Image (spheres, rainbow, N blue to C red):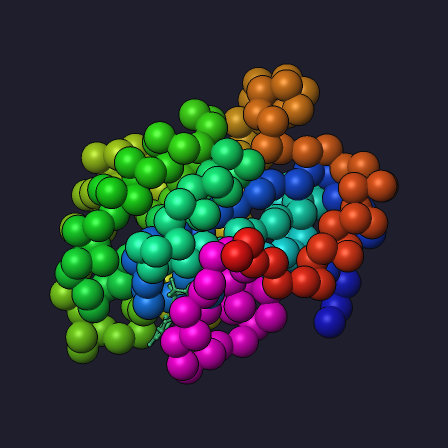
Amino acid sequence: MSSSNPFDEDQNKYDYMFRYIIVGDSNVGKSCLLLQFTDNKFRQNHEATIGVEFGGKTIEINNKKIKIQIWDTAGQEIYQAITRGYYKGATGAFVVYDITRKETFEHVEKWLEDVRTNASKDIQVILIGNKKDLESERIISFDEGNALAEKHNILFLETSAKTSFNVKEAFVKSAEKILESILKTGIDPNKINQNVKISNKDDDEEDEIREKKKLCCL
Ligand SMILES: Nc1nc2c(ncn2[C@@H]2O[C@H](COP(=O)(O)OP(=O)(O)OP(=O)(O)O)[C@@H](O)[C@H]2O)c(=O)[nH]1
Ligand SMILES: [Mg+2]
């Protein structure tokens, strides 16, 4: 991979680290979004996440290396007591629904409520309408998704974890917003948001080890 690629991995150095949590109903494609972002791969079958899985990647925005750590949570109700514990540490949240399944869109309000209740008040939320490649099965229009995002004053994108459409863009768009607010305030991000970290060599090495693992908390 060329080093000029803004999505190249550079695990040895970063300027900021943002932690993301991905939530939404089971089967909407949360794990596939993570897999597509980190490994450029797609998985056809649904292997329901048990508890929480972990992934990460370093991207570059405005000449800043941003290490993105992602907690991919289980959508199944039985794991929600566990997954709620992960909101607190998040800088950003992806709330995902499936554009072909109405109930997953109807549950977005409930997921947003979970974010409001459990996460830091500064969390940057993006609403994701996934499975955009399934246009012929679409039930939720772009405008409906966009209107819901506007109502809650959050970002919105439609994605396809299958074709990779807008997957990197979703992380970049959200990370840009977080970075923008850090640079605008000019305040040490460690003070304005406990979930944003500036690079630290020791942490980096620790993260290296953890990043290789899929974590589960059962
Ligand atoms: N066509 C299409 N299928 C997708 C897309 N994203 C995910 N899928 C499929 O949807 C199913 C569920 O994907 P997962 O990523 O495992 O779903 P999840 O949201 O992580 O589910 P839980 O772990 O149970 O919460 C799988 O069969 C995927 O292949 C997409 O963008 N397009
Ligand atoms: Mg999953």
Relative horizontal placement of residue 77, taking residue 142 as reference (left or right): right
Residue nearer the viewer, 134 or 122: 122
Looking at the picture, how far across and down is residue 158, in whole percent?
33, 58
In the rendered view, tell whether residue 88 sits above or below residue 8: above
Which residue is depicted at the point 17% across and 58% down? 103
- Residue drawn at the location 68% of the way across and 38% of the way down: 16
Q: In terms of depth relative to the viewer, which is nearer, 61 or 209?
A: 209
Is 67 situated above or below 214?
Answer: above
- Camera-nearest residue between 75 and 37: 75
Q: Residue at x 30, y 44 (%)?
A: 111
Residue 96 visible in rendering: no
Q: Quadrant of the N terminus?
A: bottom right
Q: Which residues are magenta?
A: 32-53
Residue 126 image offset from top left, x and y in percent: 38, 44
Residue 26: percent from left, percent from top? 32, 63
**Total label count?**
0
Determine the residue located farthest toward the front in the rendered image.
Answer: 218
Left or right of 65 in this view: 205 = right
Ligand 1 position by quadrant? bottom left
The picture places residue 203, in percent across and down from the top left corner, at 79, 42
Please identify the quarter of the rendering in which residue 185 is found. top right
In-front residue for pair 124/147: 124
Q: Residue furthest bottom?
A: 44
Give the residue drawn at x 39%, y 54%. 79
Tell me, yes or no, if residue 67 can be seen here: yes
49 is within the stretch colored magenta: yes
Asked which quadrant contains residue 100, the reply is bottom left
* Residue 67 on the magenta span: no
